[in-house]
Amino acid sequence: MALLAKVITDYTPDKDDGIPLKAGKEVIIHEQPQGAFWRGESGGECGLFPGLTLFSKAVSYFVPKVGL
């Protein structure tokens, strides 16, 4: 399962493996490791971004549709 959350503040990555996030947009969180950075996707881009401090409450859990 993946987690869908809403971004509460803009984020501009400083490394190539990061993705930019815009306040108000949704992000799909795929991995939430113990460190500060999580892995997911937003706006058609996949990569790393700061975890918990960037998001409002989770919107929902969902199972992405594959192969449609």
Image: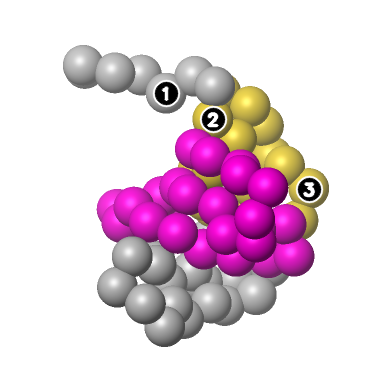
Label whose residue precedes the other's in the sequence (1 or 2) = 2
Residue 56 is drawn in which quadrant?
bottom right
Residue type pointed to by label 2? Ala
User: Would you name the residue on which mark 2 appears?
Assistant: 2
Assess whether residue 36 is covered by the magenta stretch: yes
Mark 3 Cα shell of 10 Å, populated few (<14), some (14-19), many (≥20): few
Q: CA distance from mark 3 to mark 1?
A: 19 Å
Question: Is the residue 18 above or below the residue 67 in the image?
Answer: below
Horizontal placement of 17 versus 36: left or right? Answer: left
Q: Is residue 24 visible?
A: no
Quick check: marks 1 and 2 in contact, CB under 8 Å?
A: yes
Question: Where is residue 62 shown, x and y percent of the image?
Answer: 56, 23
Residue type pointed to by label 3? Lys
Horizontal placement of 58 versus 29: left or right? Answer: right
**Region of the chain picked out in magenta, as a range:** 30-54
Is disc 2 placed on a helix, strand or loop?
strand
Question: Where is residue 6 shown, x and y percent of the image?
Answer: 64, 54
Question: Where is residue 49 shown, x and y percent of the image?
Answer: 51, 63
Label whose residue precedes the other's in the sequence (3 or 2) = 2
Residue type pointed to by label 1? Pro
User: Would you name the residue on which mark 1 appears?
Assistant: 64
Is disc 1 placed on a helix, strand or loop?
loop
Question: Is the residue 13 above or below the residue 7 in the image?
Answer: below
Q: Say which residue appears at 63% left-offset and 27% top-offset.
A: 61
Q: Say which residue appears at 60% left-offset and 65% top-offset.
A: 50
